[in-house]
Image (cartoon, rainbow, N blue to C red):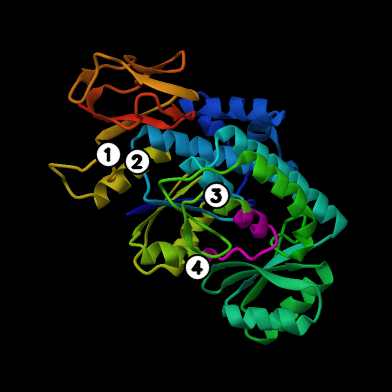
Amino acid sequence: MLAFTFPGQGSQRPGMGRPWVGHDSWELVDEASEVAGRDVSALLLDADAEELKDTRNAQLTTFVSSLMVLDAVERLGIEPSYCAGHSLGEYTALTATGALSFEDGVRLVVERADAMHEAGMASPGTMAAVLGLDDDLVEVACRRADADVWVANFNAPGQVVIAGSPTAVAAAGEHAKELGAKKIMPLQVSGAFHTPFMTAARDRLRTAIALAAPRDIEVPVISNVDALAHANGEEWSSLLSAQLSSPVRWKHCLLTLAEAGVTGFVELGPGGVLTGMAKRTVDNARTVSVATPEELDKLIEWVDASSPVATTQVEGEHLFAVERLVVSPSAGVFTPAPNIGVGTTISVGLVIGHVGDTEVRTPFAGIVQNYIAVEGERVTAHQPIAWLRTH
């Protein structure tokens, strides 16, 4: 079983969009720019580290980059059994699974980032990673500081992030060293995220989440708040709101995935930080990270190496490296082509149906294994339509 994981703020880096220019999945950048009213392309190509550190830029670029990678992976026909995202990455996971449309995902991320930026200005704070100390003792260090400092992220064994006022974080860091922490590493952030300092942003975000109205999904997403799998769209309204000022229980999310039978963790997006956390947390975890088009071949080999050679396959199970998905180019009602069915051999560029008035053309040659979308069903952009076995 595979899980797709998506990184949060802090994974962004200057020029992270350059390898994707000219790739089919780059079209998401133009769509995001139109929805956000921002030049996402310029941020992905030209912004320096200081500009990207701004919460409003960091969240939007990381979200779009991760979904661009996901779009490319979906074109390969590789699908997960579960998804999860670290902090901001939870919004990516919900968009990846269809709980949020791409447009609603962009709007929510823009609203979240702006609200968090304003909350950070109103209540200045910072964050620091505490390395080499048990979770319980990190919490003890925060209590001993007797000030505004809390655990913000349980990332992996021996890797916990604290956040709060600058003086309180410094004091808790000193207590953590006394208790045996190997290192205290300040983080370059503009606020004390996932603490009560973010409470001011919750009302504003609640309104935006209600407008987005998350939908029910088939692929569950593991929540940062309770480390449980959720597929009911209504539950996400409170979970996303609570996430702002609650600690990210990422270690617990990884353990939940492992308990559910996940053995392969695929990190999609810039960075590669989550891959290291999975290795530290889950025994014998198989991991791979994909951030550039060149790494797509690595992913195919990784999936192929972990998949048994199969002569039959039940619809809905993992697609192997010789299979491909055709995805919807837009949102609308799907109508399949009348002359193309299971077993039909098709060539690149053939129209296999319509979404509204838009043609669905296959970018692959192969044999149609089945339609995933149902005639008359309303689909979203990039939602899988059919799957093929390549020649």
Closer to the chain start, of discs 1 and 3, is 3
Real-space Cα distance between discs 1 and 2? 7 Å
Q: Quadrant of the N terminus?
A: bottom left
The residue shown at (71%, 59%) is 193
Residue bearing the label numbered 4 = 252
Location of residue 263 in the rendering, given as x and y in whole percent from the top left corner: 34, 59
Closer to the chain start, of discs 1 and 2, is 2
Residue at the farthest left position: 311
Q: What element carries label 2?
A: loop
Above or below residue 199? Residue 159 is below
Above or below residue 264? Residue 42 is above
Could you tell me if residue 54 is visible in this image? no
Location of residue 376 in the rendering, given as x and y in whole percent from the top left corner: 39, 24
Give the residue type at disc 4. Answer: His
- How packed mark 3 is, by other alpha carbons closer than 10 Å (few <14, some 14-19, many 20 or more), is many
Residue bearing the label numbered 2 = 78
Q: Is residue 380 left or right of residue 197?
A: left
Q: Nearer the viewer, residue 29 or 42?
A: 29
Residue mark closest to the camera, 1 vs 4: 4
| Mark sitting on residue 271 | 3
Closer to the chain start, of discs 3 and 4, is 4
Residue mark closest to the camera, 2 vs 3: 2
Residue bearing the label numbered 1 = 321
Location of residue 216 in the rendering, given as x and y in whole percent from the top left corner: 48, 45
Q: What stretch is highlighted in magenta?
A: 238-251
